[in-house]
Image (cartoon, grey):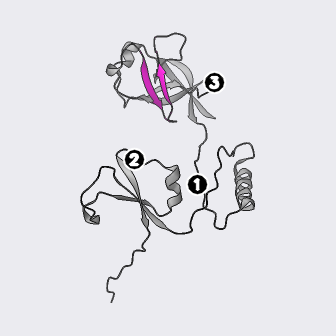
Amino acid sequence: MNTEKIMARRLTAEEVSELGPQEDIFVSAELDHLSLDCYAPAHLTKPGKYFEGGSFTAMTIFGKEITILPNNAEEPGIWVADDAGEEVEVLQSAGVLLNLALFVPSGNKEALEALYTAAREAFGAGIVQRWNEEVVAVPDVKVDLFEEPARGRKSTSGQNRDRRALDIYPTRVRFMEASAGWKFIVEPHHEVIDDTPTI
């Protein structure tokens, strides 16, 4: 873990109620089933004045949502940087979790084991882990992956549809989530041919 010591001050529920979602705060870095005696950078999920009952919800930079009762002395509370405060330890980074979908042409068990071994050698045998492994046969063909609004449209003209290109390899769709209000569209890939006359 990469941590640093900073000067910070613990806030009361009244002080937290005056904060907005853009304010930088620090909350417990504790993860599920893992006790960490330090804090993580975070922000409130909505302005403090909209919370009720002295309970606030914050989102850490690691994507964990945490509910805190600042006035409860038994909880770590909510902190802000303050030179007049006390020294606390803040978690800056704790590794990266990658969700990978690997396409291996003519893939077999030996090829997958070679990939796994190479990753363990690069990052350390105790670091790289396989949490979930699923082998799926996919056609070795390129397709275009788009997102477009999920609500139905009467017109199917490409010019009249809001859409954005995401990728040209379809297998990752199974491991992705479409943006809110959008759906995935998969179509055969057509190479872009520039037929502009040249001199």
Q: Position of residue 118 (x, y in %)?
A: 72, 56
Say which amino acid is labelled 2. Ser
Q: Nearer the viewer, residue 124 or 137?
A: 137
How far separated are the C-alphas under marks 1 and 2?
19 Å
Mark 1 lies on a secondary structure that is loop
Q: Position of residue 175 (x, y in %)?
A: 53, 50
Foreground tag (2 vs 3): 2
Callout 2 environment at 10 Å: few (<14), some (14 to 19), or many (20+)?
A: few
Q: Are marks 2 and 3 in contact (CB under 8 Å)?
A: no
Callout 1 environment at 10 Å: few (<14), some (14 to 19), or many (20+)?
A: some
Foreground tag (1 vs 3): 1
Mark 3 lies on a secondary structure that is loop
Q: Going by the image, does 20 lie left or right of 68?
A: left
Q: Position of residue 79 (x, y in %)?
A: 47, 21
Q: Which residues are magenta?
A: 55-73
Mark number, residue 101: 1
Q: Quadrant of residue 93?
A: top right
Give the residue furthest to the bottom. 199
Mark 2 lies on a secondary structure that is loop
Look at the picture and state if 152 lies above or below 194: above
Q: Nearer the viewer, residue 31 or 172?
A: 172
Residue to which mark 3 is pinned = 35
Q: Position of residue 116 (x, y in %)?
A: 71, 54
Residue to which mark 2 is pinned = 179
Quarter the C terminus occupies = bottom left
Say which amino acid is labelled 1. Ala
Residue shown at 38% from the left, 51% from the top: 183
How far separated are the C-alphas under marks 2 and 3?
33 Å
Look at the image and tell me whether residue 51 can be seen: yes
Look at the picture and state if 13 lies above or below 42: above
- The disc, 1 or 3, on the residue closer to the chain's N-terminal end is 3
